[in-house]
Amino acid sequence: MILQQYKIVFAGTMGAGKTEAIRSLSDIPVLLTEAFNTDQESHAKMETTVGIDYGEVTLEDGVKIGLYGTPGQSRFDFIWPVICQGAIGAIILIDHNCDAPLQELETFLETFQNYTDNFAIGITHVDVNSNHHSLSIYKEWLIGQDLFCPLFFIDARKKEDALLLLEALITAVEVNHNISA
Ligand SMILES: Nc1nc2c(ncn2[C@@H]2O[C@H](COP(=O)(O)OP(=O)(O)O)[C@@H](O)[C@H]2O)c(=O)[nH]1
Ligand SMILES: [Mg+2]
């Protein structure tokens, strides 16, 4: 058997559910790994290490996927290119109840488009009915941008929701790269 391991990165707003989604999916206890700032040039003062979540899931077909959670705050943005190295795609999680969810989505997509072409978007916390944003804003925005990537409303605490997003991303990778099973 050929062992294949892929890498997927979770990005998105603070508290959106990145750690929780990795926890829901992972077959192993989620690890918090430390990464050191390798980009002293643009963040010379940042000498601390940064915590990255790490989990693993093996899909039914035996493909093993490494799940990497990035720190959400932009002050850690120097670490994103490092984490994204070799990743097949990114899952962007946006908390529907944050102040400006659409702008956040736009910013994360713009940033991570530098590192990968494959995305799946999960809008979280839609069960918490504390804001006035309509759910249709995301789809309308994607259509307006001519961006066709999978978009789901999920609860990161539910394994089936997180799995749906993961499988949508893998399908997007296969479609974008013309891979047939
Ligand atoms: N109500 C609700 N809580 C959620 C949802 N997704 C995640 N959470 C919770 O939100 C909190 C923050 O999630 P966490 O994974 O730590 O966010 P991170 O900063 O993106 O890693 C945790 O208590 C999660 O259990 C959701 O869809 N709805
Ligand atoms: Mg986290």
Image (cartoon, grey):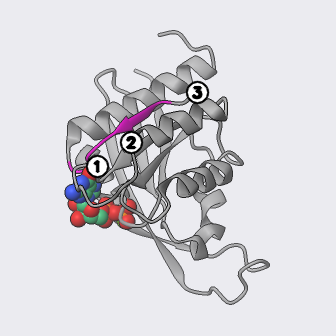
Q: Secondary structure at mark 2?
A: loop
**The magenta stretch spans residue 154:** yes
The residue identified by callout 3 is 148
Q: Which residues are magenta?
A: 150-157
Q: CA distance from mark 2 to mark 3?
A: 17 Å
Give the mark nearest the N terminus, 2 or 3: 2
Q: Is residue 28 visible?
A: no
**The magenta stretch spans residue 64:** no
Point out residue 57 in the picture as x, y percentages from the top left corner.
32, 40
Q: CA distance from mark 1 to mark 3?
A: 22 Å
- Please tell me in which quadrant of the rendered image residue 129 appears: bottom left
Is 173 situated left or right of 112 in this image? Answer: left
Residue lying at 59% horizontally and 76% vertically, measured from the top left: 75
For residue 23, the mark is none
The residue identified by callout 2 is 135
Q: Is residue 136 above or below residue 78?
A: above
Is 157 situated left or right of 8 in this image? Answer: left
Q: Which amino acid type is shown beneath numbered disc 2? A: Leu
Is 79 situated left or right of 57 in this image? Answer: right
Is 134 situated left or right of 25 in this image? Answer: right
Give the mark nearest the N terminus, 1 or 3: 1
Kindly report the secondary structure that dominates the magenta region of the rendered protein: loop
Residue lying at 67% horizontally and 45% vertically, measured from the top left: 113
